Structure formats: structure tokens, C-alpha cells
Image (cartoon, rainbow, N blue to C red):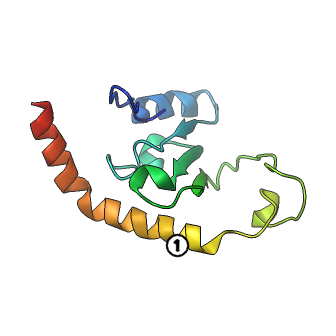
Amino acid sequence: MMVNNEIGVIQPMEEIGQICKEFGIPFHTDAAQALGKVPIDVEKMNVSLMSLSGHKIYGPKGVGALYMRRRPRIRVEPQMNGGRQERGIRSGIVPTPLVVGMGAACELAMKEMEYDEKRIKGLQE
């Protein structure tokens, strides 16, 4: 969990990612709470897989994303059996309105992240 949703702890992702890289361990993180709140750089963090959720940034409920590093490639099993959509990772048709809504919410979250960070820092202090 990159950012804890209850107490706000932010994990040292770059350090964890470096340790995983040194030992050849794939690194997955749940970044749902971090999305739109702290900068995310999968390259610096050496993240192999990252889970994201649309509703955590005021996007539509029921949509999320799984970042998957291309190299070294991580193989995952499909969540549901059926069609071979999304390169065999999932079956079924992508819910376009939900995906577009999550994309729009991500754009807004990126634009407001700096302002929100300053506001939250002020409250924290």
C-alpha cells in the first residue's frame, strides 16, 4: 500500500523498489490512495505492477487500472475466463464510459495535486 488511507503514512517506494530490483522480485503496490495525491513515477520506484481505482479520485465507481511493466514482463492470470481481450489478461468489453471518466478524473487530480498538497500540509502543521 503506497499510501495508507487511515493514517496517511507514505511508504518509501523508491527504496522498496530498489531492494526488489536487486533481488529480482516483482514489486506490486496498491496505489489507489496515492493517485492524485502524491507524484507517482513507476520508473523511479521500480514498480512491476500497480493497482489504481477511479473512485478514490472522485471518478466513476467500478473502474480501475492495473499498470504492468513491459520489461521485464510480468505474467498474470486472467481475472475471468472467457474472451481473449486485453492481450488475454481479462475477458469482456472495456466499459468505455467508466474508463473515460477515470481518465478525466486523473487529469483533474493532476491539475489540483499541488494545490491540495499545500492545503493539506497547512492543515497538518
Q: Amino acid at mark 1?
A: Val
- Which quadrant is home to the C terminus? top left
**Residue 36: where, in percent of width, then height?**
35, 53
Horizontal relation, residue 64 to residue 106: left or right: right
Name which residue lies at 57% across and 67% down.
98
**Residue 37: where, in percent of width, then height?**
32, 47
Judge by depth and name the residue closer to the eye, 89 or 116.
116
Secondary structure under tag 1 reads helix
- For residue 109, what is the image quadrant? bottom left
Judge by depth and name the residue closer to the eye, 114 or 21.
114
94 vs 8: above or below: below
Horizontal relation, residue 75 to residue 97: left or right: right
Name which residue lies at 40% across and 30% down.
4
Name which residue lies at 90% across and 60% down.
82
**Residue 122: where, in percent of width, then height?**
9, 39
Q: Residue furthest right?
A: 82
Judge by depth and name the residue closer to the eye, 81 or 12.
81
- For residue 83, what is the image quadrant? bottom right
**How would you rate the neighbour count of disc 1 (Cα within 10 Å): few for under 14, some for 14-19, many for 20 or more?**
some
Q: Residue furthest front?
A: 61
**Residue 72: where, in percent of width, then height?**
66, 48
Q: Which residue is mark 1?
A: 100
